[in-house]
Amino acid sequence: MGNCFPNSSTKSTSEISPATAKPTSAVTVKLSGPPNSLATSYLRFALLHKKVHLRFVPSEDEKPTIHVGAETVSGSQEVLLRYIEDKFPEPRLMLWKFNLEGFDEATPPIVKMIWLQHRSMLWHMERMVRWSEDLAARGGRRAVDPSVGTPKMEIRKFAKSYGELHELMVEHAQMEERILFPVLESVDRGMCKSANEEHGRELPMMNGIKEYIKSIGVMMDSGVCSEELFSLASRFKSLQMMCKAHFEEEEKDLLPMVEAAEMGKGKQKKLMNQSLELMRGTHSNVCDFLLQGLTPQEAMQYLDLLMNFADPNFISSFICQQDIAG
């Protein structure tokens, strides 16, 4: 993964985040185009990753246009993306000449989607482990970073972050169980037995952690709860190890079987449409959270999948509101 954790001792672990949209370049880029256009929204999303000063100007022109200084470029989405990549090479976004993890055009889109969701969940899980360990080390006392707030405020932020991860993980598991696994089981009965068992073990642990965080928030009214915070960190570590092993097993043993099933393009598209429909809650409520756990390249690849298979109006409205900030 390309997401880096800061080493500064003056920041609470709660501030760990992937690359944000805060500008690091003095260059101002003006993007104009129809505000409800999918192409315009897609280009805005790409430019936010480049950390330039972005100014969006709605217009009625059919095609979006990019203005950088005296330069004005207009054209297709691909033409403008190539211009963005050439003008602002870091971080690299597009994958014209190479692929992540060896993916190519033959890789079923649902395999790419699941792999990218795994990457995001593991990144966020690492973040929660680090944060819970930091909380335990401080004994629930105030964080060094004043922006985190009081201990009780920090626990609320912690609970909110885990709630988003919990929602993503639950819908991901439901999507696999209801959409992917039945297809694989129809080819070879019993193939998904181990993965289903893993889901059965993880869900009670995930729900238990959610309730435990609530109880810690209540206990903080009566003082510091050091033992409970250490227990929380231990529970997160156990869940992290279980999820990592589970995802590795799926990627090694199950996902290759999707390609081996030799489904046609029509069947692959149907699987993706069904999967995205089942995960509509995730993509409506915590899609920004999901994308924050990905590198810029991975986030663009995930967005490509959404654009190719999800409802265009839904995706356009989501991207227009996207801020990428951690």
Image (cartoon, grey):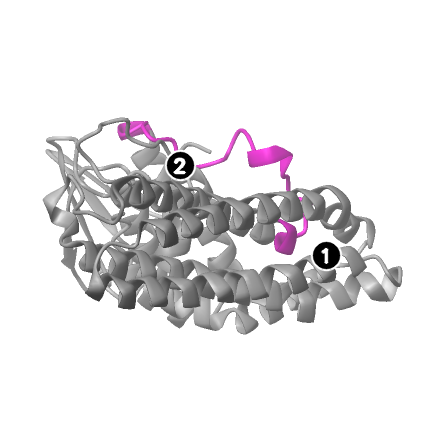
Q: Nearer the viewer, mark 1 or mark 2?
A: 1
Residue that appears at 22% across and 55% down? 154
Q: Position of residue 296 (x, y in %)?
A: 38, 39
Name which residue type carries label 1: Ala
Name which residue type carries label 2: Leu
Q: Is residue 93 magenta?
A: yes
In screen coordinates, is 283 left or right of 193? left
In screen coordinates, is 57 left or right of 186? left
Measured in 3D between alpha carbons, the distance from the residue under mark 1 to the one under mark 2, in whole angstroms, is 33 Å
* Residue nearest the viewer, comparing 50 with 202: 202
Q: Position of residue 159 (x, y in %)?
A: 33, 61
Disc number placed over residue 233 in the picture, else none: none
Please give the range of residues in magenta: 86-111
* Residue nearest the viewer, comparing 120 with 26: 120
Disc number placed over residue 93 in the picture, else none: 2
Q: Is residue 309 visible?
A: no
> Mark 1 — residue?
195
Q: Is residue 181 above or below residue 244?
A: below
- Give the dominant element type of the magenta stretch: helix, strand or loop: loop
Residue that appears at 22% across and 37% down? 51
